[in-house]
Image (cartoon, rainbow, N blue to C red):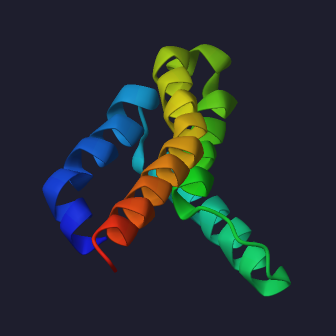
Amino acid sequence: MAAGTAAGGWRIIKTMVHKKVKLQPIHGFAADTTAAIIIHSASTVGVPVSTTHVISTSIMGVGATKRLSAVKWGVVSRILLAWALTLPVGATLGCALVRLGAVFGH
């Protein structure tokens, strides 16, 4: 995770903060606090959640409180598409790598 953040984390942060919704420091604080409460609550109950999904939707929520047009919905739709593709692509890639490993005797 650290390598991924170091390699491309700035792009993710830039997309979240500048391309999806223009945030002021107080809005960032509200989004982070909301995300922390949700993640803590889910962890307490034992529900697995994606921190990325929670933080992203918290940022969208903060933007939507300003006005719905403050959220750049085109960027949001691309993020949602990426989330929808993550599970099947990850499962397919995992299956392919396991089968490839079996071919080579691992």
Question: At 66% across and 19% down in the image, what residue appears?
Answer: 68
Q: Could you tell whether 20 is left or right of 69 in the image?
A: left
Q: Quadrant of residue 35?
A: bottom right
Q: Quadrant of residue 65?
A: top right
Q: Could you tell whether 41 is left or right of 15 in the image?
A: right
Q: Relative to residue 106, is residue 63 depicted above or below? A: above
Q: Could you tell whether 92 is left or right of 39 in the image?
A: left
Residue 103, image x, y percentages: 34, 65
Question: At 34% across and 61% down in the image, what residue appears?
Answer: 100
Question: At 49% across and 34% down in the image, what residue appears?
Answer: 82
Residue 11, image x, y percentages: 24, 42
Q: Could you tell whether 82 is left or right of 66 in the image?
A: left
Looking at the image, which is closer to me, 95 or 13? Answer: 95
Looking at the image, which is closer to me, 92 or 11? Answer: 92
Query: Which quarter of the rendered picture does the C terminus lie within?
Result: bottom left
Looking at the image, which is closer to me, 76 or 93? Answer: 93
Q: Relative to residue 3, is residue 95 depicted above or below? A: above
Looking at the image, which is closer to me, 94 or 7? Answer: 94
